[in-house]
Image: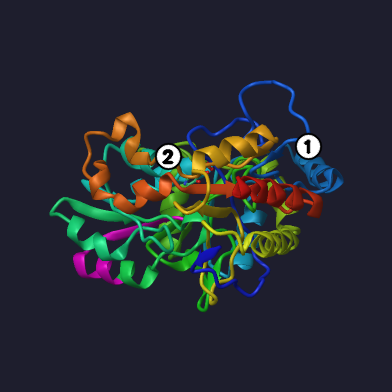
Amino acid sequence: MDEIARKTAPEAATPKASRLETGQTSTVRLGQPPSTEAISPEPLYVTTPSLPPLDDFTQLIRGVWDRRLLTNGGPLHQELERALAAYLGLEYVSLFTNGTVALVTALQALQIRGEVITTPFSFVATGHSILWNGLTPVFCDIDPNTLNIDPERLESLVTARTTAIMPVHCYGHPCDTDRIGSLAQRRGLKVIYDAAHAFGVSDSGGSILRHGDLAVLSFHATKVFNTFEGGAIVSGSRAMKTRIDKLKNFGFEDEVSVTEVGINGKMSELHAAVGLCQLARVDRDIHARSEVARQYRQALGELKGLRFIGATTEIRENHSYFPILVMPDFPVGRDEAYSRLRDQGIFARRYFYPLISDFPMYQRHRGTNADLTPVASRVAKQVLCLPMSSELRPTDIDRVCSAIRTIAKC
Ligand SMILES: Cc1ncc(COP(=O)(O)O)c(C=O)c1O
């Protein structure tokens, strides 16, 4: 197996993320098939959420019952904001009910208008947050090595109507933040990173969430750091945090004044309690994930026609996903590999297929023609995310790898 940008990072102690394809399942078991058909042996889903000991949670929840403060910035919400800021080494964190509302609010906070350049190779919430704000998404092709927005191609898409770029740190692998930052500065554009997958990822300067005007996290059940549902916006100043906090609370300035058209994006005390318990375990989970990644690489490394996607050595990864590309010299195509794994109860997922730009509501926008995004169009047909979680046992990993080896022999 040849690998793209493999270079495993020093196994750090930070969190991760993970998630979806076309439809986000409502259950926590990502990749669960819609049918209830019995599958044997035991199904292996693309991810299994990590959960704290129930007693840790109930202990915190007792306080909620005593105080009767259930939401609206209660003490657990405040404590989680502080704890996350400390963990990430960043000052301004605003918790949200989920990552999608956080993305929608981030665009509002910066008063973005007109066109927003983004990637088609992401979960649909990235594009939807732009459309939901009445803005025009413009799709930029991706870099074949990182699968993130290609900075080479960005500038040619900037028009007089462009006001922002929304890149995604896909799989938690950092975008080329230097080039994106300098282009944005030169052309007077805002940058909002969709960092849904990037909790706990850092480069030599610290958390990658410091890049851009705003960075948005998801704490969905499938993510490395999960609060069942949840999200956050990381901002760069007290004034911006105050604005975001106002927007997520209907636009209330004080008890009697509403000064913005806000939304209800507040995280509840229950979700904040989950977050506090999870934060205590997240480094251990990340380490366990890095071990899973190491074992996959070792077991599949010599197979011809599979390609790993990874971050560079200077990056502290979170191993939120384990994506591989099924290349033309693999004996079967990606879809056949996907189906044959599924027949054995191994629910790998094709993240991200279809491309966002292939969904019907995007058809009239620029960049939706596959000729304009040839790399993304090709990769969407090659990518497969193997089961990845801190809960995977060595026997599970062996099962996945031997199933792939069997497919490779046909
Ligand atoms: C890249 C990306 N952006 C945004 C989101 C939306 O996050 P949430 O599910 O918390 O609304 C997700 C969710 O998985 C995602 O993968």
Residue extending farthest to the left is 160
Q: Mark 2: which amino acid?
A: Val
In the displayed structure, 352 sits above or below 359; it is: below
Q: Mark 1: which amino acid?
A: Trp
- Rounded to the nearest angstrom, the CA distance separating label 1 from label 2 is 37 Å
Q: Which residue is mark 2?
A: 124
How crowded is the residue under tag 1: few (<14 C-alpha within 10 Å), some, or many (20+)? few
Q: What are the residue bounds of the magenta stretch?
A: 182-195
Is residue 188 shown left or right of residue 55?
Answer: left
Which residue is found at the position 65% from the left and 46% from the top? 74
Q: According to the image, what is the colour scheme of the structure?
A: rainbow
In the displayed structure, 269 sits above or below 288; it is: above
Q: Where does the C terminus fall, quadrant-wise?
A: top right
Is residue 397 shown left or right of residue 350?
Answer: right
Please state the horizontal and vertical placement of residue 390, each as a whole percent of the image.
73, 54
Q: Where does the N terminus fall, quadrant-wise?
A: bottom right
Residue 205 is at least partly visible in this image? yes
- Please identify the quarter of the rendering in which residue 235 is found: bottom left
Q: Nearer the viewer, mark 1 or mark 2?
A: 2
- Please identify the quarter of the rendering in which residue 211 is found: bottom left
Please state the horizontal and vertical placement of residue 276, each as a whole percent of the image.
71, 53
Which residue is found at the position 64% from the left and 66% from the top? 87
Report the disc number at residue 280. none
Q: Is residue 105 magenta?
A: no
Q: Which residue is mark 1?
A: 65
Q: Which comes before the other along the chain, label 1 or label 2?
A: 1
Q: Do labels 1 and 2 touch, CB within 8 Å?
A: no
Q: Is residue 194 magenta?
A: yes
Residue 30 is at least partly visible in this image? no
Please state the horizontal and vertical placement of residue 81, each as a whole percent of the image.
60, 56
Which secondary structure lies at badge 2?
A: helix
